[in-house]
Image (tube, grey):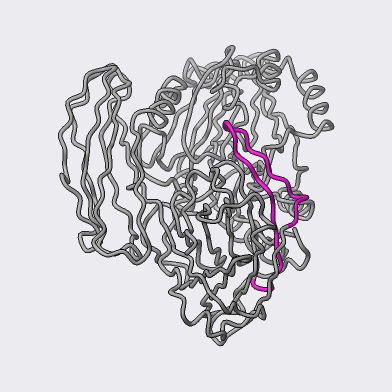
Amino acid sequence: MKRFLFFITCMLTLTLAFDFLPEDQNVSDFRFVVIGDRTSSPVEKIFDEIIDEVCLLNPDYVINVGDLIHGYAEDTTVILAQWDTVLTILKKLPCRFHLTPGNHDIQNETDRRIFEDKSGTNDYYSFDFRDNHFIVLNNTITQWVSPQEMDTAQINWLKDDLEMSKHADNIFIFFHVPTYLDAFRNNTPDSLVNLFIRYGVRAVFAGHNHSYLYLNQGGTDFIVVGSSGGDIGNNDFARGNFFHYLTVTVKGKECDIAVIKKGNVFQKNIVTGDNYLALARVDREAVTMTSSLVKEGSKKFYQSVTLTISDLGPDSIRQSVQWHYDSTRYRILPQNMLLAIAPDEKKNNQFHFTVANGSDIYPLARFTLAYPFTYGKVCTLRNYLPVKRLYKVKLVKVPPSIDGLLTDEAWKKIVPITNLGNYDGSALTSAEKTEIFLMHDKDDLYLAARCYESDFAGMQATASEHDGAVYIDDNLWFFFDSDFDQETYYQLMINSKGVTFDRQCSLKDGNSTKDLSWNGPWEIKAGKEDKAWTIELKIPKKGLEPYSEKQWGFSLRRLQNRLGDAYWNIPFGHDPKNFGIIEFE
């Protein structure tokens, strides 16, 4: 009788315990957090503050989508120190943290081994949690080559892993680079997307772009997690440019995904695939500007620029184009212009500007425009005044000797290029002063550089072989469009030891080719002064055939790893239409 009463008491206790559980709660329910990129160009304290906020949510575990460290260093002590910094921050989490490799995390085999040691996993792996299957892939790329497909062994492993886990409640996949966006933009098939849809993958999480994006294909959610600390460029909310992370709540075979900005929670479709396509079209087609040629050394240079604005959205544009500029460098009239443009209408708007000094143009003037790109949503369009710089190259009778020293009388008679800016057209505040000298005679172009440096010990100069990793050293970049066809051109990088990395390149009909097997005709010597490293360079014009006797496309960049980049002509990159010009006397 006592045993019977004890059994009844236990049953009542269990019944009462389960009665106090919410009807929709199940012991298999759980919540995890997805963290976006911490680098590149991390914004101070943002990642730390996001981790503090995640701690308050007390998730079951946290996973990132790559780029926790800056990487891009050959010195393993630097890489290890970067990992120690970020792992110290992550120790605050009240749960396990899973790592996904990004291109800043893994650049080479050494980086991969360090990643595996720090993460305690392979560079791609899978795990199970409460009848759910999680797959982490490695599709890291570098900025020096085109995006690479994952290796065959990893693809075969993925297919086997999906097959073995096809009966899981949910399958979640994580990798860094959202390679499927190219197929989405071009409306072409993607083998990985098709594979994920075929196996009923619930959601695919990527990063890399530092902007949030959601789209659904075949019942699978594809989410690009934006920045959780890496630079976002501007705070245009309509583009998904805001610091955030995701929470994923799993209940059986269902899951809810929330986008969390500090102090805010948003639905997952806050920026949709349709928004993405509409914004991409707006960026390409909504505003075009005529470029203006500004000569180095010109004073109070006056020109006009035409902004052609097309209304591609469903609503009329009734906003003002507003110019923002340093009045000591520019004057633009009118500074504000009210627009009245109907849907599908295009209008030309002319502005007149004066540049006070053609050798002092940064920060560039900028315009902003509130643009209604779809029903009920407005984005901010912004761009800088399109200035193409021109430098006149002096003709000399007695050229310099190429010894790495800038002591020849010929150099003393040249006015150098000194005014460089940031990549976004703002005034340079980080990299130290750079002087670029150019002269020519009948057969050769001569170039010299003086790169001021206040901390030689802090410089990076590891590459010692031609076509080695000069691009990660403190260096100078040059582009030469010698026949001025704005299609074919040459690229040269030089580090402080005079080691070079060069390629013959072309950009035709949107197709880019870069031939690393090509070697330039450069004669180069490096030197050193008390407060600068120097380069002297002789370029036989015939070595860059075909070539123009009058003008070449030209662009340059200085990379000072410790402090930042500096650019002569904006935008900078592999598009010869955007190069500045050197004109031969």
In this picture, residue 233 sits left or right of residue 547: left
| Residue toward you, 571 or 480 | 480
Q: Quadrant of the N terminus?
A: top right
Task: Residue 429 in the image: state x and y as whole percent.
Answer: 40, 66
* Image vertical order of residue 577 relative to residue 256, above or below: below
The mark total stands at 0
Q: Position of residue 194 (x, y in %)?
A: 68, 16
Q: What residue is shown at x 33% (from left), y 54% (from top)?
A: 364
Q: Is residue 517 magenta?
A: yes
Residue 219 on image: x %, y %: 57, 13
What is the magenta range?
496-519
Considering only vertical position in the picture, is 465 above or below 259?
Answer: below
Q: Quadrant of residue 425?
A: bottom left
Depth order, front residue of 148/415: 415
Residue 394 within the magenta-colored segment of the rendering: no
Query: How far from the left and from the top, in percent, is residue 305?
Result: 28, 43
Residue drawn at 18 percent across, 30 percent down = 339
In the image, residue 335 above or below residue 135: below
Q: Using the rendered view, name the quadrant where residue 449 is placed.
A: bottom right
Q: Nearer the viewer, residue 379 or 554?
A: 554
Q: Residue at x 23, y 46 (%)?
A: 323
Nearer to the camera, 279 or 294: 294
Q: Is residue 124 left or right of residue 90?
A: right
Asked if residue 127 lies left or right of residue 16, the reply is right
Is 230 above or below relative to 132?
Answer: below
